[in-house]
Image (cartoon, grey):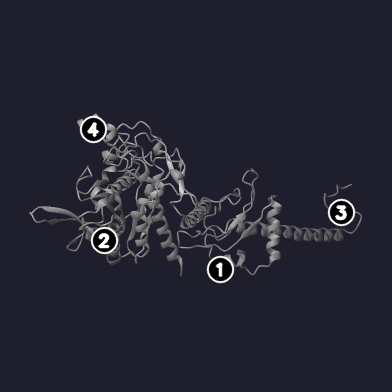
């Protein structure tokens, strides 16, 4: 008996023609089935190819019409494609899309990928990443990469988070009273190492002059309503790029000026590109000084003007000269700095000296010399003269104007010229009840500032400095004492100025915050339509 075929047995006992016809009929049926399978497989493969390896021309009309969310393709079709993906990749994937957003403002959220894939950061399970086809940063060679954000997505998200944090910080600082707070220990301070800045005047260089304790450098000022950001020297230099910052006032402003130079210089790589314009290395005795930060086209200057009004001389009957203080004239150097971008004024300490405090035959207006004038009234006249000059000469749409208030002294057992001391003070005052009376001169100043046409930012450091009886040079004001000083070293103390690093660094941190707020305000205004 003939062997039967594997698929269709032949009927050897029947008609041969009938068997042949049946066989060819079977072949036709199998061909149609094979074609159907082949077509289905080709369709699925083509669909997967388009999904994971789109055309490099992602903007082609055909591509967009076929696969973007705005396509005319039905939802059921897209659901079917998702089912196919799920069949091949047995993982749970949820995705959502939203329109990308962008803004030119540096304080707005930057544009980021519109695709979000839910995942657990601790899971090692690989998940299928839903692809936004218009995203040119995708990797077509590896469409099955783990579902983690791309580098660009991560940086954008991190940047967005940082910007949100900064906006939150700026809004908090805008509402904050910087001068109502307390000093807290912070081991991350000072802002620059003692001895790292050779520009510090000997009078302020306490460690160099032998001061043994160092805790006075380890305090940060903490306002009640906010937290001051640490001064970032590089960022402050960027804010000051191309600008001119000027200090005008007495030696306490020189204290602050030197502090800021050291902070900013510490943030510059090439220190040789920070120098005094006239090559000076000592900063006492001249009428003005200017430090240049060459890489930033920025200068930070100091004009010596202890009263803000002019010291004067008049001839008396016997031909000798008499010193007076012209309460009606601002300092002679005023025209040199009226166009500066930032100006920080101060006065106060020289008004406690004998001539000013007694006020006898010293104060002058016009040709009139007062036989006697109360120091508070004289101070009010001088500050009013200064305020009128600011209103008339400074364009506050271009320039920022600050007035730093009185910096507290801590002489005990006498004044600066009568044996006052503070050498035993090594910790700040902790209880407010031990603070001194708020200076009446500062109340006079505040009243004048309120009546000004131009806005002046008041740096009211009086109370915050009153806590810091530990921060003065005291006996560590110089390294080499004179023979007379060696006989009675405790009789010659400085309880007015401040060691550097030290308290003036905090004043500059507040100045830094004011500049950040100004920059934020400018950006906010530009953002408005």
Q: Do the residues labelled 2 and 1 touch (CB within 8 Å)?
A: no
| Label 2: which secondary element | loop
Please state if 228 lies on the left or on the right of 484 as rendered. Answer: right
Which numbered disc flags the more N-terminal residue, 2 or 3? 3
**Can you tell which quarter of the image residue 392 is in?**
bottom left
Q: Are marks 2 and 4 in contact (CB under 8 Å)?
A: no
Return the residue found at the far left: 319
Q: Which mark is residue 10?
A: 3
**Disc 4 packing (10 Å; few <14; some 14–19; many ≥20):** some
| Label 4: which secondary element | helix
Between marks 2 and 4 in the image, the one whose residue lies nearer the viewer: 4
Which numbered disc flags the more N-terminal residue, 4 or 3? 3
Which numbered disc flags the more N-terminal residue, 2 or 4? 2
Which numbered disc flags the more N-terminal residue, 1 or 4? 1
Q: What residue is pinned by disc 4?
A: 485
Q: What residue is pinned by disc 1?
A: 61
Q: Residue 482 carries which label?
A: none
Q: Is residue 313 visible?
A: yes
Please state if 354 lies on the left or on the right of 183 as rendered. Answer: left
Q: What residue is pinned by disc 2?
A: 338
Between marks 1 and 3 in the image, the one whose residue lies nearer the viewer: 1
Question: Observer-nearest residue: 212 or 328?
Answer: 328
Q: Do the residues labelled 1 and 4 touch (CB within 8 Å)?
A: no
Between marks 2 and 3 in the image, the one whose residue lies nearer the viewer: 2
| Label 1: which secondary element | helix
Rendered position, 498 above or below 22:
above
Name the spot of residue 505 as percent of width and height, x first. 37, 45
Name the spot of residue 184 as percent of width and height, x first. 46, 42
């Amino acid at each position: 008996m003939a062997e039967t075929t594997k698929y269709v047995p032949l009927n050897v006992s029947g008609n041969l023609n009938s068997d042949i016809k049946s066989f060819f009929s079977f072949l036709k049926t199998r061909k149609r089935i094979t074609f159907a399978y082949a077509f289905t497989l080709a369709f699925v493969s083509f669909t997967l190819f388009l999904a994971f390896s789109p055309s490099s021309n992602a903007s082609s009309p055909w591509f967009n019409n076929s696969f973007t969310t705005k396509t005319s393709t039905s939802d059921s079709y897209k659901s079917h494609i998702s089912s196919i993906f799920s069949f091949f990749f047995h993982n749970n994937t949820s995705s959502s899309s939203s329109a990308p957003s962008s803004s030119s403002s540096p304080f707005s959220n930057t544009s980021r990928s519109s695709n979000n894939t839910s995942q657990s950061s601790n899971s090692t399970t690989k998940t299928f990443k839903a692809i936004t086809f218009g995203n040119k940063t995708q990797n077509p060679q590896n469409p099955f990469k783990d579902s983690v954000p791309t580098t660009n997505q991560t940086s954008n998200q991190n940047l967005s988070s940082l910007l949100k944090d900064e906006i939150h910080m700026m809004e908090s600082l805008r509402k904050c009273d910087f001068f109502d707070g307390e000093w807290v220990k912070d081991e991350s301070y000072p802002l620059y190492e003692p001895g790292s800045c050779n520009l510090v005047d000997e009078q302020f260089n306490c460690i160099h002059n032998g001061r043994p304790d160092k805790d006075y450098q380890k305090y940060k000022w903490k306002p009640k309503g906010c937290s001051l950001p640490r001064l970032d020297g590089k960022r402050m230099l960027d804010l000051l790029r191309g600008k001119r910052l000027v200090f005008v006032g007495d030696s306490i402003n020189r204290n602050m000026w030197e502090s800021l130079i050291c902070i900013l210089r510490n943030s510059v790589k090439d220190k040789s590109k920070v120098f005094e314009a006239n090559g000076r290395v000592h900063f006492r005795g001249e009428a003005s000084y200017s430090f240049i930060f060459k890489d930033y086209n920025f200068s930070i200057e100091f004009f010596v003007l202890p009263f803000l009004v002019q010291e004067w001389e008049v001839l008396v009957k016997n031909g000798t000269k008499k010193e007076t203080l012209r309460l009606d004239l601002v300092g002679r150097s005023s025209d040199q700095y009226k166009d500066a971008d930032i100006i920080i004024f101060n006065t106060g300490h020289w008004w406690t000296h004998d001539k000013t405090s007694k006020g006898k035959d010293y104060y002058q207006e016009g040709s009139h010399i007062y036989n006697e004038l109360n120091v508070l009234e004289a101070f009010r006249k001088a500050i009013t003269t200064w305020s009128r000059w600011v209103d008339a000469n400074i364009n506050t749409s271009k320039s920022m104007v600050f007035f730093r208030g009185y910096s507290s002294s801590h002489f005990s057992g006498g004044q600066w010229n009568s044996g006052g001391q503070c050498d035993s003070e090594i910790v700040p005052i902790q209880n407010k009840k031990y603070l001194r009376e708020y200076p009446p001169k500062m109340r006079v100043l505040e009243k004048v500032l309120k009546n000004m046409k131009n806005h002046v930012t008041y740096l009211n450091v009086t109370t915050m400095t009153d806590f810091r009886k530990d921060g003065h040079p005291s006996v560590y004001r110089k390294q080499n004492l004179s023979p007379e000083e060696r006989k009675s070293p405790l009789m010659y103390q400085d309880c007015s100025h401040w060691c550097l690093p030290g308290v003036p660094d905090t004043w500059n941190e507040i100045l830094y915050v004011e500049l950040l707020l100004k920059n934020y305000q400018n950006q906010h205004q530009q953002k408005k339509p």
